């Protein structure tokens, strides 16, 4: 009976720790603290050398839990990434995820070598452990802060953080082999990297396709789709790892494949994985916190802080600026990407590998990784939003995104129903603006269900349900959010809505449901802009086009290269001068 009681008490204490982490998130959100930091601190305070007195030193269990959690987090990250986004930033993101990790480790190593008296291989292992950005930290902190980043910057950060973990794991394992087995040739290292990357890619793509086939062809019970996908992700991870391939790369690519194919119960799977990854992160961070001994941390705190400072202020920025030099990123974008090199559980998880294999001074790697992660979450995690605004990387967000409800339609995979509350001053309410691929199906008003015809005109507070392709559902958000126009157009902040000047009016009409004269359908936006303003365009010029406005974004050699699309309705001019200017512009457009 005593052993049964011990098990029950263990379950109780474990559940209470996780519950404490969940409840502390309310306080953290109120004060803007990174939640991952809170979970780490909860685990640390509960440890044997701290207030809780819970004895826990099982590195193997922590490694297993960390592997499962990280696999699910990476699969979920791939599931939410669009192929179009992935392809658009593939080159810079992969460069950061491979060469960038190597540069970061190499530039961090000298600090560890000279401050801690390590060999070069040991110092490189310290660099490798802390070199990769953490997908969970980046995904969560960007979205939790309500940031709407320039699309290219946000996509680069998400794809980099989702794809650099496999390379960091490979680099760490190879360096651990160097320290345990002895020196290996660089040819051997490159061969191992290539083998793991190729095998991981093949297993991930084939595994993702297999999940899609099973979901769509086998009649699983309604509640089993989401558990099947989550379990299949772990099967892919375990199989790839057992075959000495990169399991983390395989599971990320499998998620990418599944997320970009039409599947049954897609929304159920996304919601389930969201809950599972949250629980996995909490358990992983709490366990990692339990492994920390605050008393031992004090002994190496100064060298660890020096490593963290070198990583945040020297190694990461230098690696980012070098890797992104061939690509057309501005210095502001590079600076922001450098600063959002958030470290999280991956660094501490990698530091548990030396503990697991019993390397000399293994606790030192763990303590340095813990201090580095803590510093990154405290300093970088708390300053992401101010940095984005100061560097003009954040697009203005006046309201939180609308609450989107997605409903699968059994029997087909091409369409789903997407529901939105109609906000006052939203583009849909003001102008009835919707893309051509979205079709209203019903409206809920005062608890009554109305057809689109019966509901006319739509009112603020209604709930509109639209038929749309699942892969495009998220794009509808912009039509249902409150978007007051800025006092003056800022061309730098049009990243969410700009298109090439070579796009035709007909193509734009198809997307946004505009009425264009047949003879103008083949005219490019650049030519239309030039015809309307009767002069050379300059940044910030505005030309109305039906229910939207075209804003000059970038001008090259006197011709419009890219055009911003403003969906919000212009307010009435507030001053007499502004009213006169608007009246003159309207008169000129009528005369022209």
Image: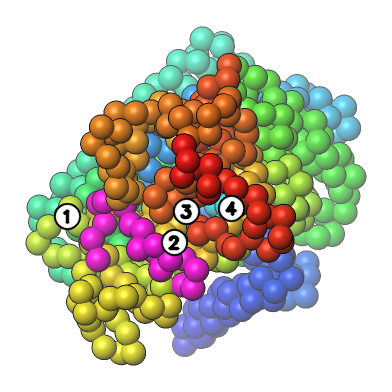
Residue in view at x 21 percent, y 69 percent: 441
| Label ID, residue 413 | 1
Residues in magenta, as a range: 423-440
Q: Earlier in the sequence, mark 4 or mark 2?
A: 2
In this rendered view, identify the residue nearer to me: 281 or 8. Answer: 281
Residue occupied by mark 3: 567
Residue in view at x 12 percent, y 57 percent: 412
Q: Residue 413, can we see it?
A: yes
Residue occupied by mark 4: 583
Please tell me whether residue 355 belongs to the stretch shown in magenta. no
Farthest front residue? 591
Cβ–Cβ under 8 Å for marks 3 and 2: yes
Q: Secondary structure at mark 1?
A: loop
Q: CA distance from mark 4 to mark 2?
A: 24 Å
Q: Earlier in the sequence, mark 1 or mark 3?
A: 1
Q: Secondary structure at mark 3?
A: loop
Q: CA distance from mark 2 to mark 1?
A: 28 Å
Residue in view at x 53 percent, y 33 percent: 533
Residue occupied by mark 2: 427
Q: Earlier in the sequence, mark 2 or mark 1?
A: 1
What crowding class fits label 2: few (fewer than 14 Cα within 10 Å), some (14-19), or many (20 or more)? many
């Amino acid at each position: 009976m005593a052993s049964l009681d011990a098990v029950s008490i263990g379950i109780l204490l474990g559940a209470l720790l996780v519950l404490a982490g969940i409840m502390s998130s309310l306080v953290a959100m109120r004060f803007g603290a990174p939640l991952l930091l809170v979970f780490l601190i909860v685990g640390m305070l509960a440890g044997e050398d701290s207030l809780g007195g819970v004895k826990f030193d099982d590195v193997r269990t922590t490694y297993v839990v960390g592997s499962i959690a990280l696999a699910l987090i990476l699969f979920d990250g791939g599931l939410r990434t669009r192929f179009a986004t992935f392809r658009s930033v593939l080159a810079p993101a992969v460069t950061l995820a491979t060469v960038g990790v190597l540069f970061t480790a190499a530039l961090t190593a000298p600090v560890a070598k000279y401050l801690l008296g390590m060999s070069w291989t040991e110092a490189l292992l310290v660099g490798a452990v802390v070199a990769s950005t953490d997908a969970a930290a980046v995904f969560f902190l960007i979205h939790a802060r309500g940031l709407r980043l320039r699309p290219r910057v946000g996509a680069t950060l998400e794809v980099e953080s989702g794809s650099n973990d496999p390379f960091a794991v490979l680099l760490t394992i190879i360096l651990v082999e160097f320290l345990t087995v002895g020196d290996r040739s660089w040819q051997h290292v490159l061969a191992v990297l290539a083998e793991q990357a190729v095998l991981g890619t093949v297993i991930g793509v084939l595994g993702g396709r297999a999940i899609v086939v099973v979901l769509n062809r086998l009649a699983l019970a309604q509640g089993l789709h989401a558990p099947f996908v989550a379990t299949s992700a772990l099967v892919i991870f375990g199989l790839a790892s057992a075959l000495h391939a990169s399991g983390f790369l395989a599971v990320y690519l499998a998620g990418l494949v599944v997320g970009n194919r039409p599947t049954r119960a897609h929304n159920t799977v996304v919601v389930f994985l969201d809950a599972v990854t949250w629980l996995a992160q909490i358990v992983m961070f709490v366990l990692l916190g339990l492994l920390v001994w605050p008393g031992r941390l004090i002994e190496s705190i100064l060298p660890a802080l020096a490593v963290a400072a070198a990583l945040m202020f020297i190694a990461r920025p230098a690696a980012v600026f070098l890797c992104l030099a061939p690509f057309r990123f501005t210095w502001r974008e590079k600076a922001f990407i450098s600063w959002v090199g958030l470290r999280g559980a991956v660094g501490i998880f990698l530091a548990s590998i030396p503990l697991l294999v019993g390397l000399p001074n293994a606790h030192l790697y763990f303590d340095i990784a813990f201090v580095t992660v803590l510093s990154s979450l405290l300093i970088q995690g708390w300053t992401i939003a101010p940095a984005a605004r100061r560097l003009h990387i954040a697009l203005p967000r006046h309201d939180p995104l609308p609450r989107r409800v997605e409903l699968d339609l059994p029997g087909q995979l091409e369409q789903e129903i997407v529901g939105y509350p109609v906000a006052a001053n939203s583009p849909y309410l003001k102008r009835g603006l919707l893309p051509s691929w979205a079709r209203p199906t019903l409206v809920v008003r005062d608890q009554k269900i109305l057809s689109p015809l019966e509901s006319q005109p739509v009112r603020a507070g209604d709930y509109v349900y639209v038929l749309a392709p699942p892969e495009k559902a998220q794009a509808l958000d912009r039509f249902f959010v409150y978007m007051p126009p800025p006092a003056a157009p800022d061309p730098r902040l049009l990243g969410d809505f700009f298109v090439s000047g070579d796009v035709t009016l007909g193509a734009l009409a198809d997307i946004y449901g505009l009425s264009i004269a047949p003879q103008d359908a083949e005219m490019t936006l650049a030519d239309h802009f030039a015809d309307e303003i009767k002069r050379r365009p300059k940044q910030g010029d505005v030309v109305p086009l039906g229910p939207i406005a075209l804003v000059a974004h970038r001008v090259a050699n006197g011709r419009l290269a890219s055009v911003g699309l403003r969906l919000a309705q212009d307010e009435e001019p507030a001053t007499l001068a502004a009213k006169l200017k608007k009246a003159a512009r309207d008169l000129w457009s009528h005369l022209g």
